[in-house]
Amino acid sequence: MTIASPAPSASNPAGWLNNQPYLLLSLSSLFWAGNIVLARHVGAHVPPLTLTTIRWFGVFLILLPFSWPHLRRDWKALRAHLPLMLFLSLVGFAFNNAISFWALQYTEALNALLIQSAGPLFVALWSLVLFGVRLTAAQLAGIAISLLGVLIIILRGDLAALAGISFNRGDIMFASSLVAFGLYSAFIPRRPKIHQLSFLSFTTCCGAMMLLPAAVWEFSAGNVLKLDATTLATFAYILIFPSTLAYLFFNRGVALIGPNRAAPFFHLVPVFGSAMAILLLGERLQLFHLVGYALVLAGVVIASRQGSASK
């Protein structure tokens, strides 16, 4: 699917970036890497439904000055595809994010990262069930190799530790958010041919409005936002990086190479997360890190290369 975009040139970095799917998808994973740990850390400061509602209203307001001309031009197409746009707003923004933030109040970041490793499989499943798009042998091999790398990183080289991990209701909730995001990813190539700013502005606004009654209920139940430095820093990061930029980059990357070739990039999230722990938290680089990184990168390259596209 073709999306209107500036012609790339040496003097137009944005136009060049807009046509680099592998870089766009890698940056999305980088921006999402800190999201799980951050959301787990600020659970006592920001109630999950309030956080998600403010997140998407904030993104909409950030984008509106830039997206308004495109929204006006694309309004007819948006109205013509309103059921699909509302559905994408629900599964990709309202439900997916609210349930994942909520789940992190009941589970550990390690469990969430393990469950997130199944993300590419949900994308592949929905693509097959809904549109008959099959994984090629290269895509399946790439996902399996990168998944093994993720497990090595998260379990610190001891795969036997997987048997000792217990799951709770938060894990089930987090898994349901991945099911929803897999559905969103499978539908991205079939969205109307509108500018990406129109698409993201419309879906974030609709997602926020869908969540507003739940946020009001949360507030009335006594779960009140604590406005302090931690909360403000959290919103600054979430609004700019894992929300605005990551979704713009992810949507564009999927539009360029398709959901099945883009899905293995989810496995870069724990890679970037562990690298951040090494660089920022003083964790020691060990052999299992290097083995895991090598497997994840090899799997992503194998699954996303041009020759692995589904027929």
Image (cartoon, rainbow, N blue to C red):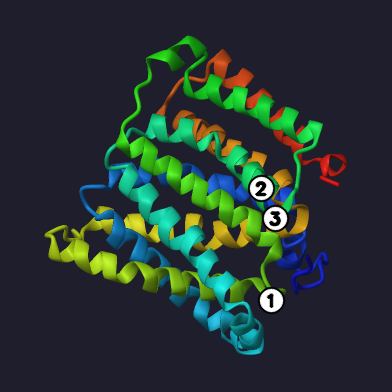
SS class, disc 2: helix
**Residue at x 37% of width, y 36% of height:** 171
Q: Which tag is nearer the camera, tag 3 or tag 1?
A: 1
**53 relative to 295, above or below:** below
Sooner in the amino-acid sequence: mark 1 or mark 2: 2
Rendered location of residue 205, percent (x, y): 45, 74
CA gap between label 3 and label 1 equals: 15 Å
The local secondary structure at tag 1 comes to: loop
User: What amino acid does circle 3 point to?
Assistant: Gly
Q: Residue 80, how many percent across, how many down?
A: 63, 82
x and y percentages locating residue 162 in the rendered image: 45, 17
Q: Is residue 238 above or below residue 172?
A: below
Label 1 or label 2, whichever lies nearer to me, is 2
Which residue is tagged 1? 194
- State the SS at label 3: helix
| Residue depth check, mark 2 versus mark 3: number of the one nearer the observer | 2
Residue 253 - label = 3
For the image, the number of numbered tags is 3
Where does residue 210 sit, x and y in percent of width and height? 38, 70
Which label's residue is closer to the chain start, 3 or 1? 1
The quarter holding residue 198 reads bottom right
* Residue type of the residue flagged with mark 2: Val
Indicate which disc, 2 or 3, sits on the residue closer to the N terminus: 2
The residue that disc 2 covers is 129
Question: Label 2 to label 3, Cα distance in Å?
Answer: 22 Å
Instruction: Answer few, some or many: residues within 10 Å of disc 1's Cα (few below 14, many 20 plus, some between 14 and 19).
Output: some
